Each structure stands twice: as C-alpha cells, then as structure tokens.
Image (tube, grey):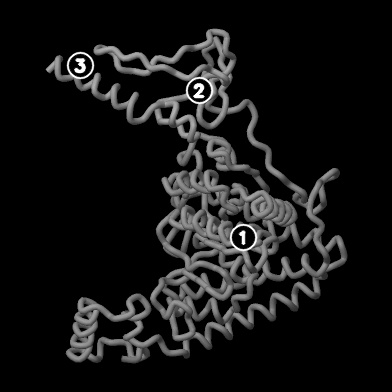
Amino acid sequence: MAIWISRSRGIFNHFLQRACPLSLLRQRDIRPFSYFEAIKGREQLEPHYYEEDYHVDINHDENQQALDFPGGKIPFTSQMKFISEASGTRLSCYRILDNNGSPIPGSVFEQVSKDLAVKMYSKMVTLQIMDNIFDEAKKKGRLTFYLTTVGEEVVNIASAAALSPDDIVLPQYRESGVLLWRGFTLQDFTNQLFGNKGDNGKGRQMPIHYGSNKLNYFTVSSPIATQLPQAAGVAYALKMDKKEACAVTYFGDGTTSEGDFHGALNIAAVLEAPVIFLCRNNGWAISTPIAEQFRSDGVAIKGQAYGVRSIRVDGNDALAVYSAIRAAREMAIKEQRPILVEAMAYRVSDHASSDDSTKYRSREEIDYWKRRCSVARFRKWIHKNGWWSDEEELEFRGNIKEQVLQAIQAAEEVEKPPLTDLFTDVYDQIPSNLQEQERYIRDAINRRPKEYPSNIPL
C-alpha cells in the first residue's frame, strides 16, 4: 500500500508538471484552487517533487507585509487577536422626527412636498381603518384569517412612496400598505380576502396573500424567507436587461434565522444585484423575541459580513424611512449593488388573527408602544405645517370606513370561482392525475350535493 501511494503521488506530480503547468495557468490569468501569489514579480514557481511529499513548495519572503490572496491583499500581524463578538456601542438609528413630530435640529433628509405628505398620511389612515374593520370581520366569522400592520404602517407607506412603479416588490405578508400605495383598491383587497371571482388568485390562496402582476407585486408566499433569494434573481434580471429599476423585498427579523436570508445577501453581493432588502425588525418572530433570535446587534450589522451596504432606520419615522429608501434605491440602481435596510418598528398587533400575543408579552408592553403611534407622529408633522386639519381628519376617516364596509358587502355577494379553476393555470394540458382528482371531487358532490357550498359554480 505504501509503495502504491508513493507511486501515485509521483504520477500526480508528473501530470501536474506536464499536462497543467502553473506557467500556463498564469498566462491565462487562471489560478488553481490551492495556488496563491504572495508577492508580485516573483519568479515562476518551480515545483519540487518528492515521493514522500507531493505539495508545491513556494518560496516566501519573510519580510512581506501582506498576503496576496484571491479576493485581495490581507495584511499580516504578529499579534493574535480575535474579532470581538460585538462592538462597544450599538449601531445608531437614523431618525428625523422626534416623538412630537418635530424635525431634529441638523437633520439631513429628503424634502417632501405637501401633496406627497398628505397622500402618504391618507394611505396610512386608510391602512389603519382597513386593518381594524377586516380584523373585526375575522372575529365575527366573516373572514377565515387576517393579519394587520399595526405599528408598521409607516414602514409600509413611506417605503412604497420612495419607490418607482417599475421597481419589483417581493413581499412577505405584512406589506398590504405597499400594494395600497401602488393602486390596489379596497375592493381588490376585499375580493382576495373573500376568495371570490374578483380575486386575482381565483380563490386559491388563503386570505392576505395578495398579488398583482400589473402593479409589479409578487404574490405573497407563506413559507418564510423564500422571497429573498428570488429577489436577488429578479434584481439580477433587471441588471442584465439594463433597466432603471430595482427589486425590493420585505421580511421580518425572524426571517434572518432562515438560511435563505444569508444565501440571498451573499449571492446579491457577489452578482452586484440592484436589490433592497428591507427588514421590518418588529421585535417578535411570532412569539420569539429578538433576544432569542440572534446575538448580533440587530439585522443591519449582518450586511457587512456579506459585503452589503446597510443602514438602521427608525421605522416609526415616516421622513426617515422615506429618505433612507430613496437613497437606497438610488445607490442600488446607479452603483448596481444590494442594500440592506433595518427598520425598527415594534409589532403592536398580534402576529395574526390566530395569535394571542398576551400569552408571551405583557399588556403593559403593548400599551407602551400603542402610545408611540407612528401614524400619529407623522400627523403632528403635517399638522404643524398647516397641511392637515382636525376637520379633514374626521371627514376622511368617515369616508374610508364607509368605503371598506361597502367593499365587504359587495365582495360577499360575488360568487366564488368555478370548481374547474382548481385545476387550471398550471399545465397547458391538464395531466391525468389532476383529471382523476377532478372526477373524484365531482363524484363526491353528486353523492352529497347538500354538503357542497351553493355559491361555488360547478
């Protein structure tokens, strides 16, 4: 065995020298995996071959100050020093408006016109009212499921306002405000929640899984983090097509515990893809607090490890979110690079209609954050500017509430999509297994017609 190993090493070294000389690789500017150049201008390497040791022997300069390794030069040090697990101070949070809605002196931010500010505020209020009524409808049994954005309305609307309609959005499930800003109507939302014939998804998705091809808004997908690597791919496609647009994907702090988060940041950085990763750090991944999610200083700091430019922003500050996303979008497109934004916005509501958050957090904690309402803070700012009045507030809220209630009534009266829609829109020719499933369902209906919903056409 020892003789065979020795001879094998010799054969391998002979092949390395004759069939794949390093000089040839250097001429083509290609380096084998195990080879690196410590200093420039070094003489061509001449490997030495030994029966007992077949490695390539490289002459080192003892006085060299850096390792010229693939990826860039690495400085040497004679002192053993581990990288600290945390810096001495926490990453700062970009903020413009204080809790009273007044700009902090010396703030640098994107100027917002009266028309834009009023539109942003009106959409925030619409989102609030929509959430309240739909959530109440779920509690009364008129809906099967719902999920609100309470505490995160500003992240939704301010980020959407900073984007272009050409930017492609890949949401998680708490971004209905982004879709609202882009033109999804109250009736569109209601049709999806009730799964009727007006629903873009033809009733095949559970409630709040919105989507709109026309509005460049990917359909919501329940599995956590799947949209992140997809966003990197979408952004790379935009890059290849030389489009003046970027991809934007939203996710929560719990998503960073998924492998897709890390893979997405890495591939986006390597491919230099124009994508904004917008994390809504709301403090809770359902019932898991962030202290049990990670030991790092939040999410933004993770970007540096992957070579992704990052920022932490106050998610309760509309001007800060708007300014940060505007800047992130400009960098993503002009510099062709990914950007990671961490928006700090506490989730005031339960995770979803199936959750009771008082089981894992105190009522006092929830009430504390309710009093720090981000929508109210923005209202104070536009009110101080003379752009909004209490009379306008009262009238607007009344009108939106009436519109939502009318949309629910209309959606309930629209029939459901036909049974055949369960099997279409996937295959050009419906395969035999799906045909068999359809026959089985129809046979079951024929046997027990009274158990089949009357509002679903056959």
Q: Earlier in the sequence, mark 3 or mark 1?
A: 3
For the point 58% across and 42% down, the residue is 308
Image position, residue 252 (x, y; %) = 52, 52
Residue type for callout 1:
Lys
Q: CA distance from mark 1 to mark 2?
A: 36 Å
Residue under pointer 2: 37
Mark 1 sits on what residue? 242
Residue under pointer 3: 6
Q: Amino acid at mark 2?
A: Glu
Q: Where residue 392 sits: x, y (%)?
A: 79, 75
Residue at left offset 58%, top offset 86%: 406
Q: Is residue 9 left or right of residue 311?
A: left
Taking depth in this image into account, of 209 and 62 the one nearest to the observer is 62
Mark 3 element type: helix
Q: Which of marks 2 and 1 precedes in the sequence?
A: 2
Q: Residue furthest top?
A: 62
Spot occupied by residue 306 in the image (x, y as percentages of width and height): 53, 39
Check if mark 1's residue and mark 2's residue have beta carbons within 8 Å: no
Dot 3: few (<14), some (14–19), or many (≥20) neighbours within 10 Å? some
Q: Amino acid at mark 3?
A: Ser
What is the residue that sits farthest to the left in this orientation? Answer: 1
Quick one: label 1, few (<14), some, or many (20+) residues within 10 Å? few
Q: Assign a secondary structure to mark 1.
A: loop
- 254 lies left or right of 41: left
Instruction: Check the image and report above or below for 256 versus 64.
Output: below
Q: Quadrant of residue 418?
A: bottom left
